[in-house]
Image: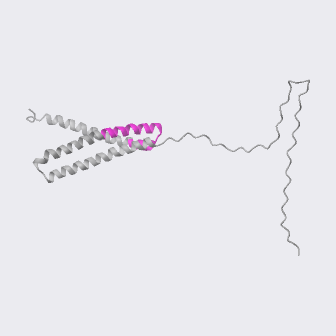
Amino acid sequence: MTDPQPPAVPAVPDVPAVPDVPAVPTASAATPAAAAPAATPAVAPATATPVPAATAPRKGRGLGVFALILGLLAMLGDILVLVVIGVQIASLASNFDWTTLAASFAGVAILAIAAFFGGFLVSALAILLGIIAAVKNRGRAAGVVGAILGFLVFISHLVVAITLAGAGSAISGIPGLTS
């Protein structure tokens, strides 16, 4: 019996040899300054791989998002304060007592004043940061929405301030009310 023969390995195709590099001519004694440059061996050119263009670092959207959060806080804060004041007034109306009336109104007045000036401050910051975010493209859409919400709250607070100022001058003009 004979041993089985291993499978034949396919022949490797002939690879063309690298052409011979011509000899570098040596500088002769007659022409010392005319030395020929060294020849480079012929090498196949490397394939050019595209290099991605350097992209600018992406700017964050944090400023616009912060303006949006401030605008939402100003809007929701005003709604919350209106609800709390409404509940306090409803509580006063249902349990009317002259002895606790002044203390109850003082608490509502302090909350209203704090919310009024706090709303002015937060809405002004939302407007300012929203505009900066929109101009510098640092969360443009969120910044614009935050600026709009802040503007709405700011305008509502201005209307309330003007109304209260007009009411104050109207009350002071009632005859017999002032001394």
Which picture quadrant has residue 122? Answer: top left
Q: Is the magenta stretch mostly helix, strand or loop?
A: helix
Question: Residue 84 location in percent, x, y?
Answer: 24, 49
Question: Residue 105 location in percent, x, y?
Answer: 17, 45
Number of numbered markers: 0
Q: Which residue is rendered at x = 26% and y = 47% of the image?
A: 81
* Front one among 153 and 11: 11
Q: Which residue is rendered at x = 44% and y = 39% of the image?
A: 134
Q: Can residue 155 be seen in this view?
A: no
* Front one among 1 and 100: 1
Q: Is residue 27 left or right of residue 151?
A: right
Q: Which residue is rendered at x = 85% and y = 30% of the image?
A: 36
Residue 92 vertical placement versus 126 (above, below):
below
Q: Which residue is rendered at x = 86% and y = 28% of the image?
A: 35
Q: Give the range drawn in magenta.
A: 119-146
Q: Can residue 170 be seen in this view?
A: yes
